[in-house]
Amino acid sequence: MTMKLAAAGAVCDLCHHHQPSLYCSSDSAFLCFHCDSQVHTANFLVARHIRVPICKSYHSDDDDDDDALSSSSSSTVCISNKTNSKTTKSADWKTREVLVSWCSRLGGGSSSVIEAARHAFKAWWVNRSRSEMECPYRVGLAASLWLGLTKDVHDMKKRIRLLKRLEEISGVPAKSIVLEQSKLLAKTMKHRHRHHLHQEEEESWAEC
């Protein structure tokens, strides 16, 4: 599915205020992160709605916009706009808001867990392969939070209880959470390794 969404006046179909970040095919609606969280945590049935992340890209003229839209993934909705940095900050804030809400419903979570989950989600979002573009936002968010929780909680019985509770809260099957978390862990470790090599390379050049 490929859609063109005009940047001018594009707003969430529910609040009519924020810029849309996701498209829900079941509801035929463009939603911002906040409204998506409100709507799709109501019950298990709506939590299973597949939402497609909107890809935001900016190009200098209309021709470039058309090229970007036509070459986008079939599972991605694309929107061209001139406020990409503002939208990114807003989306990041909304992501943290959802993580805080989920942690609270899980019975609390340290700020380190939330920050670890937020950074993990960023890595998941940026480094998705083409085949992973169809993976719902909620799955990535649940996997990211689970990654943060596993670093903080070491008791296996408590982990099992938290995983079951996270499944209920997020609407994402536990198996999907664990599977996506394992992929995310591998990606973050690979990213850290690359970053470490880059730092060593910079230090070696500085010594020359």
Image (tube, helix red, strand yellow):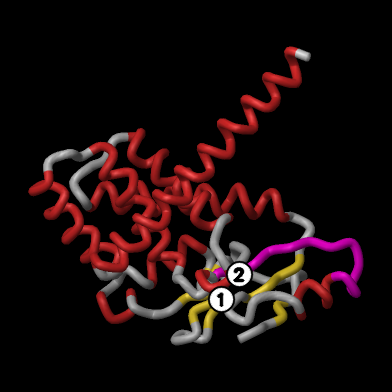
- Left or right of residue 65, residue 106 in this image: left
| Residue identifier under label 2 | 54
**Residue at 67% across / 50% down in the picture?**
86
**Residue at 67% across / 83% down in the picture?**
3
Q: Quadrant of residue 199?
A: top right
Which mark is nearer the camera, 2 or 1? 2
SS category of the residue bearing label 2: strand
- Left or right of residue 71, residue 73 in this image: left
Asked if 134 appears above or below 1 in the picture, the reply is above
Q: Quadrant of residue 130?
A: bottom right
SS category of the residue bearing label 1: strand
| Residue identifier under label 1 | 30
On residue 42, which mark appears?
none
In the image, residue 60 lies in the stretch drawn in magenta = yes
- Spatial separation of the CA atoms under disc 2 and disc 1: 9 Å
> Which tag, 2 or 1, sits closer to the chain's start?
1
Q: Quadrant of the C terminus?
A: top right
